[in-house]
Amino acid sequence: MKLQDYVSQKAIVPQLQSTERNEVIHELMDALVAAGVASAEVRDELISLIIEREEHGSTGFGKGVAVPHVKHESITKMAAAIGVSQKGVDFNALDKAPVFGVVLLLSPKDKPDEHLQAMEIIFGNLQKDTFRRFLRQASTVEDVVELIRDADAQQI
Amino acid sequence: MPTAQTDVVVLNRLGLHARPAMAFVDVANGFESDVRVHKGSQAVDGKSIMQMMILAATQGTELVIKADGPDADDALAALSQLFADRFNEEE
């Protein structure tokens, strides 16, 4: 499995507007709805579930990245949005540092193994200093698309 | 410094997703010993949530936890209990 398999190009937001966690989750969900991978009818419900998940324990695991996520029955195919913030987002991260890269993952309810495989790919990349640096420097959709392509080709 | 290891199996249906992985890391960080988690030939730092997530340990996965330090045995007992309890998940 590769990042390209589930990161929707239309759901790449290279310049997140907000610096607030909940607003950023809204921005990324709107991108996923616009990309056609999540239905507008469940938008609000998914946002609530993702925020609730964050309240239980931040997915800002440190190093300036966060991976908010939710499993839901309306999702038939795994899909992720990627957001980049130039200013930094307060995600209540474990290391208390602002977050510059956000990967929001939507997973089907009944495919826990696929969810774990997607997380493996996401975290395998987010752990790399070069990946995080390039992500943070990205300012256009093309920058992020190129980064994903290079990451999938193991060229970073 | 004692080194100890124990075998565990992921019992909960959802596998070692973010919440149980975080629970594992929290418990591991309560001990002085170094904790490594092995899945086949792959080994990660059991005190790092980002590293634990790349294990992609699905239900049924067999893992080996190794602890190295003065409280290695206690660490292994606490960590293997998490697996036995299915990380407090219902299934």
Image (cartoon, coloured by chain):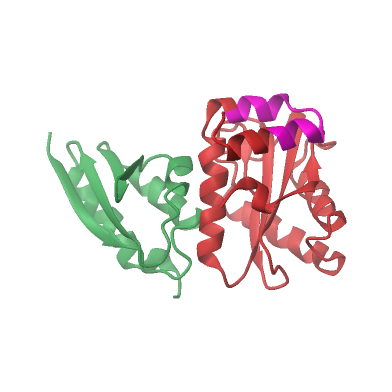
Chain colours: A red, B green
Left or right of B34 in this view: A94? right
Dominant SS of magenta comes to helix
Who's the residue at 63% across and 33% down the image?
A150
Left or right of A96 in this view: A8? right
Q: Is residue A89 visible?
A: no
- Whole-percent x, y for residue B30 in the image: 33, 42
- Whole-percent x, y for residue A127 in the image: 51, 34
Q: Nearer the viewer, residue B88 or A68?
A: A68
Magenta stretch bounds: A131-146
Above or below for B27 versus A36 = above
Q: Nearer the viewer, residue A49 or B51?
A: B51
Q: Nearer the viewer, residue B14 or A2?
A: A2
Q: Is residue B36 magenta?
A: no
Q: Nearer the viewer, residue B2 or A139?
A: A139
Above or below for A88 versus A71 = above
Residue A56 figure quarter: bottom right
Q: Residue furthest left?
A: B2
Above or below for A47 versus A124 = below
